[in-house]
Structures are given as C-alpha cells and as structure tokens.
Image (cartoon, rainbow, N blue to C red):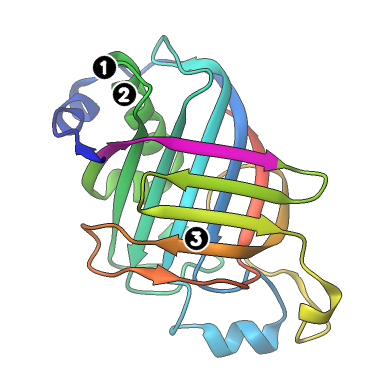
C-alpha cells in the first residue's frame, strides 16, 4: 500500500547538497511515440505525449553521502503540452508524482528524493505528491525487455519494436530521452500505465513506440 511521505518535502528543501558518483539503469515511457517519423510525430504534437514515467534503478553510489545501491525511484509527469524535443522544458505547466522505494530507510528516502529532484529536471521540482511504494525494476538490454512495477499505480513492460510496427518507414529516435542517460535505446511498450492519484488523470498506452532504456552515471 502506498504511504504518503510528507516529511520528505521538507527534507528536500533543507537536506544536504553534496553528491558523489552514482550509476545504474533507467527506463521511461511517454504517451506519444519517441521512435517515429515526422508524419506521425506531427499528428501527435499538442494532442499526445503530455504524460510520462521516468524510473531509475541505482546499482552503486551515494547521494548526499547516503548509499543508495539497490534502490529505485520513479517520477510520473503530467503536463499541458507535448514533452517533445526539449523534454520537461517544453511544457508551461507541469506537475509530478514521486514514488520512493519502500525498502529505503528514512535517510535513504531523503536522498532518493534529492536524487529525483536533481535528475528529473523541472519534473523533480514540481512534485504535488510524494509516496512510498514497493518498486520492482529489471531491464534486459539485449532483448529490450524492461519491467517496472511501482505499487499498484505504475506498470511498464517493454520489448523490441517489430518491423511491421513502423508506420512512416523513416523512423528515428525522434525525441531525446527526458533524463540525461547513456546508450539510450528505443523500445515498444507492451504495457504502459499510470493508475495513481494526485495528477488529475490516468492513462494507458499499450503498443506505443514510447520507451527508452539506458544507463546513467551522475
């Protein structure tokens, strides 16, 4: 069950500022195609792509001197414009939900929130709700199979995009990832769903070419 962690909001504004190197893997999905061509992207512009899920699984390293190895954090975004070439900076209005790994102790929860605020751009600083939830995240970069489950509110499963799913026939990585990552590879969402509270809408985009998987070192 999700548990709102109100104290994290205060901690984020009064916490530590120093950070050491931290690395791991990342996955995101949007409510628009990111592996696409101009014909499809232009049709979606202004209508789709206003919502997104960003998730980090930390393999090693510390934030603010707090070890975060093995922990996860998820940011869910709701905006008033398509999150396109400039990512979270495209939208004039934006709000987010941050989900903190329930295995983290109090200090780690503060550090995970600081991590999200640092690396999710405006989305990390625009949280209207912060919850603690069980988060499972596993990525297979060879087969592009990703699985993210955050409580009962976020589900994301990915796979390789099939040739027959290309519509424009000149598909490229049209929009960049929302986060700073390395070796970003696009994939298709078998499931991509947000069913939580706080953002004013819920959504599901199965079959969308909307996923990026990558690695990060900050």
Q: Decide: marks 2, 1 in contact (CB < 8 A)?
A: yes
Rendering coords of residue 137 (x, y %):
55, 38
Q: Is residue 177 visible?
A: no
What distance separates the C-alpha of mark 1 from that of mark 3?
A: 31 Å
Which mark identifies residue 109?
2
**Of pointers 1 and 3, the one earlier in the residue sequence:** 3
Q: Quadrant of the N terminus?
A: top left
- Where is mark 3, residue-wise? 87
Q: Is residue 197 visible?
A: yes
**Of pointers 2 and 3, the one earlier in the residue sequence:** 3
What distance separates the C-alpha of mark 2 from that of mark 3?
A: 26 Å
What distance separates the C-alpha of mark 2 from that of mark 1?
A: 5 Å
Secondary structure, mark 1, is helix
Using the image, determine if residue 51 lies above or below residue 63.
below
Rendering coords of residue 167 (x, y %):
75, 86
Q: Is residue 166 left or right of residue 135?
A: right
**What residue is rendered at 53% in x and 46% in y?**
148
Between residues 20 and 127, which one lies in front from this camera angle?
127
Kindly report the secondary structure that dominates the magenta region of the rendered protein: strand
**What residue is rendered at 50% in x and 43% in y?**
55
Residue range highlighted in magenta: 131-139
Q: Quadrant of the C terminus?
A: top right
Q: Is residue 136 left or right of residue 105?
A: right
- Where is mark 1, residue-wise? 106
Using the image, determine if residue 23 lies above or below residue 37.
above
């Amino acid at each position: 069950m999700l548990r709102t962690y109100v104290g994290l909001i205060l901690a984020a504004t009064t916490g530590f500022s120093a950070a050491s190197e931290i690395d791991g893997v990342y996955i995101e999905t949007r409510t628009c195609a990111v592996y696409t061509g101009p014909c499809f992207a232009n049709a979606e512009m202004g209508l789709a792509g206003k919502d997104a899920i960003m998730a980090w699984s930390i393999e090693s390293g510390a934030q603010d001197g707090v070890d975060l190895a093995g922990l996860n954090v998820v940011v869910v975004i709701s905006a008033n414009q398509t999150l396109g070439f400039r990512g979270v900076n495209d939208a004039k209005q934006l709000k987010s939900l941050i989900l903190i790994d329930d295995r983290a102790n109090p200090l780690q929860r503060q550090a995970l929130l600081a991590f999200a605020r640092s690396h999710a751009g405006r989305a990390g600083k625009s949280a209207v709700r912060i919850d603690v939830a069980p988060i499972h995240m596993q990525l297979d970069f060879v087969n592009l199979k990703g699985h993210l489950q955050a409580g009962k509110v976020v589900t994301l499963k990915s796979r390789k995009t099939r040739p027959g799913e290309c519509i424009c026939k000149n598909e490229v990585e049209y929009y960049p990832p929302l986060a700073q990552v390395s070796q970003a590879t696009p994939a298709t969402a078998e499931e991509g769903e947000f069913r939580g509270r706080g953002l004013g809408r819920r959504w599901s985009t199965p079959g969308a070419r909307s996923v990026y998987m990558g690695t990060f070192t900050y």
